[in-house]
Image (cartoon, grey):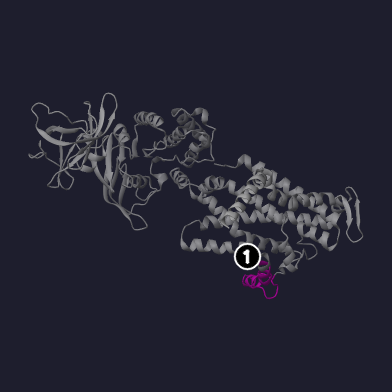
Amino acid sequence: MISLQNIKKTYPNGLTVMDGFSLDIEDGSFTVLVGPSGCGKTTTLRMIAGLEDVTEGRIIIDGEDVTNKDPGDRGIAMVFQNYALYPHMTVAKNISFGLKNFGYSKEECKEITANVLELVGLTDYANVKPGNLSGGQRQRVALARAISKKPKVFLMDEPLSNLDAKLRVNMRSELIRMHQKLQSTFIYITHDQIEAMTMGDYIAVMNEGKIMQYGTPEEIYSDPQNVFTAKFIGDPGMNIVKMPDGSSLGFRSSKTHFSKPDDFDGAVLSGEISTRERLGDINHYTIMADSGEEFAVRNEEFFDFGHRVNLYIKRGDLYAFGPDGARCEVGKDLPGEV
Amino acid sequence: MAEKLNAVRARLRDFFMKRINPIFQCPYVLIAPAVILCITFSVIPTIMSIRNSFFRTDYVMGVDKFVGLSNYDSIFSDPNFLQVFGNTLIFTAVTVLFALPLAVLVAVFLNKNTAIHNFTQSVIFTPYIISWVSIAALWMFLMDPQFGILNLVLGYFGIEPLMWMLSEKTALASIIIVSIWKSLGYNVMIVTSGLQSIPNEIYEAARLDKSNKVRTFFKITVPMLSPTFVFLVTTTIISTFSTYDLIKLMTQGGPRNSSNLMVYWIYQTGYLEFNVGKAMAGGVILLLFIGVISIANFTMMNKRVHYK
């Protein structure tokens, strides 16, 4: 288990990016840290790796306090966003460089290098320099380099963000397969909530150096604990309606009806269709509500621009949040039909 | 009045459009200034020196006679020339061998972005922009056998005072020291910029690979600086081969030819002994030598150098 205990991080320029940060990551899990830019997810990863000092608090990997250990002695491997391969070394040398430092003999280095290259399907490229490889191949070399060290923990800092869309989808499933095969702990950073939802066993949603919610993708999506998580997770994020008393109501864009369902009990909002994208089987609408708020709506019914509509949301599909943004019970008084 | 002015303007415009513009539309006209300069100051002098190296020329008596290879014959049997050639090789080799590692050492040390490091870097750079005359004067003062500071410092360590430029044994070494000192700032600047072009993640990857500082330096920093080294080795060799000012100002090649270098020898032979043919033959040898070394340097290093 990896455990971060009461971490405080202050940069040399005096900026404190996190304070009292704690997180436990289970062995063998695929945990995704997700959040907007500057939320501290990369800092967290770099502190686990030992590339960044911890101002206060402790980092424990497998019951061992590694807070002051060198990155090479923590039993971790990292895959960087821009690969960080050694450009002057061949693919095989990129992998064996680290192995030699870890005290493997020449024969062992050769064998391990050959094995991991086969695992990522780059055996034919052993003597090629990274400059002659495509982005996807470079990423695979970086992955092979990480795997070769047989680490307890893999740290991945947005490894797919430099790849094109199609390759990204392929690599995503490849990483999931790799995780099942290796059975090691993966800690994966992304700002892309789709990646988080599809890859993670557990997701930690972060904002401003704090964990907003930690749980399985299902929990995070269907049971958000606060407005931030609700808005951040999902494509599109949850629609939020401000209530007069400062609290707010949320609903998913697909859980809306344009016509009143039978036995309706729930909230009704009225507004005007301001944009529409027709995708064939479903339409994406933006609805400008009378209150001035904008909602994303997915619906099969077809309406044109400027059309006035009523949105019906059933009580069961509503989420309520208190004035502080935390989740609470859905109240009795809901906005009704005008 | 205004009409007249307009008419003149129109005629002028016409003249420019029809007569002048076509001239400047021709690419050869556009590159002509550069080509003329290049031919006048590089190509013609080179051809002239190659030609003159096969002639015996005496401007006073008006002699200009083809003598074949006899100029080359005479320089290769001239012990002075051979000594000068040897001096030049020693000067170049020692300067390259000491100046570059020293520059790397200083650059690695100064490659931190704090006020004191930046200040030091600027201070080291100043000699490079100071003229040779001032530098020669300064070092002649420092190296004065009787009143110089260097001998004073050596005295503290119990070392006998040296004669520096005034002794056959140390004259060349003195020149080498000054030359390394002057170019240090420039070399450090180039190496620093090379260091800064190495991305930080690569060093982080090396830390995760458990590479210690020494291994990281030799296995990552040095190979990634190789393009910088090729550049510096080539420019240093060319500049040491063509060193003239320092010799002229500090030692005039003496004592007894011990600190004489090729270019100063050419000057001596051509302008002090008025033996133009012999001087030009030396010039051609120098030209060939620099050419061969530059080409060899580039082809050899190209195989091993990493360019991104």
- Nearest to the observer: residue A210 or residue B17: B17
The quarter of the picture where residue B186 lies is bottom right
Is residue A299 a member of the stretch shown in magenta? no
Q: In this view, does B180 lie above or below B67?
A: below
**Quarter of the picture holding the C terminus of chain B:** top right
Q: Can residue A249 be seen in this view?
A: yes
Specify start and end residues of the magenta stretch as a single range. Answer: B135-161
**Quarter of the picture holding the N terminus of chain B:** bottom right
Q: In this view, does A195 lie above or below B22?
A: above
The quarter of the picture where residue A29 lies is top left
Q: In this view, does A136 lie to the left or right of B164?
A: left
Label 1 chain ID:
B
Residue B27: x and y in percent read 66, 43
Residue A44: x and y in percent read 33, 46
Is residue B147 a member of the stretch shown in magenta? yes
Per the image, label 1 sits on a secondary structure element best described as loop
Q: Residue at x 61, y 59 (%)?
A: B184
Q: In this view, does B85 lie above or below A244?
A: below
Residue A192: x and y in percent read 33, 37
Which residue corresponds to mark 1? B130
- Which residue type does callout 1 highlight? Ile
Q: Can residue A29 be seen in this view?
A: no
Q: In this view, does A99 lie to the left or right of B137?
A: left
Residue B74: x and y in percent read 87, 53
Label 1: how many residues lie within 10 Å, few (<14), some (14-19) or many (20+)?
Answer: few
Q: Is residue A82 left or right of residue A186?
A: right
The residue most toward the bottom is: B147
The residue most toward the top is: A281
Q: Is residue A10 left or right of residue A251?
A: right
